[in-house]
Amino acid sequence: MSILLGLTGSIATGKSTTAKIFAEAGVPVWDADEAVHRLYARGGEAVEPIEGAFTDVVTDGAVDRERLRDQLEKDPAAFDRLNSIVHPLVQDDRKAFIKRHDERVLLFDIPLLFETKAETAFYKVVLTTIDAQEQRRRVVSRRSMSEDQLELILGRQIPDREKRKRADYVIETWSMVHVRRRVKDILDEVSKDA
């Protein structure tokens, strides 16, 4: 049986980069965001139920994420409606990933892991983090997000200080050398537990 590691972290804390480093070490990675993209794509399982729950968010048979985001910004309560549709489908996708792999360690990249109370599904949880100033600098450098959008996202997430208390491992992502060292240390440690 594989050891299941959860990976989480707020926006622009280096989570995707850290997941790639785990993958380079031979760990299969399941990405919640990629699963959602598949579910929202033409023919995806979430398209029809989202179309029934939201007005004018499906274009050419796929969920238009920008239109959906606009509706969510106007009605924050709509997040609960969306989550009730998407979360069960994402969980099914995650279970299918586990069935397809028999490697010693599997990594699950889940941005809202604590927020969705999913931590109990994992042997250990790894958190990526960076100081708030650097986080904002990274977001702004992407130029794909406004300050208002960032605040909306951060407002839906548990504060970093709370995530640090709940995580089994914390990786500060200020240096790639440091991240690679921490990933190796984590894999060495959990492999001993297998």
Image: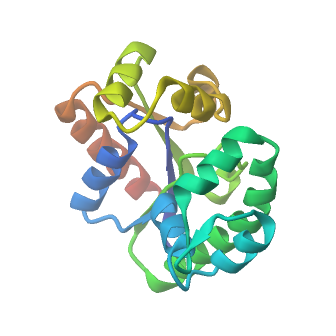
| Residue at the (32%, 45%) spot, across then down | 18
| Residue at the (81%, 57%) spot, across then down | 81
Q: Is residue 100 above or below residue 136?
A: below
| Horizontal side, residue 135 vs residue 175: left or right | right
Q: Is residue 148 above or below residue 194?
A: above
Q: Is residue 53 above or below residue 19?
A: below
Identify which residue, 126 or 192, lies in the foreground.
Answer: 126
Q: Position of residue 136 (x, y in %)?
A: 40, 21
| Horizontal side, residue 190 vs residue 83: left or right | left
- Is residue 5 visible in the rendered image? The answer is yes
| Residue at the (40%, 24%) spot, across then down | 135
* Residue 106 occupies quadrant: bottom left
Q: Residue furthest top?
A: 133
Q: Position of residue 121 (x, y in %)?
A: 66, 59
Q: Position of residue 9 (x, y in %)?
A: 49, 38
Q: Across the whole image, how many numbered discs are drawn on residues?
A: 0
| Horizontal side, residue 19 vs residue 78: left or right | left
Q: Residue furthest left?
A: 177
| Horizontal side, residue 161 vs residue 176: left or right | right
Q: Position of residue 101 (x, y in %)?
A: 43, 80
- What colouring method underlies this structural image? rainbow
Identify which residue, 70 or 175, lies in the foreground.
Answer: 70
- Is residue 88 visible in the rendered image? The answer is no
| Residue at the (59%, 20%) spot, across then down | 161
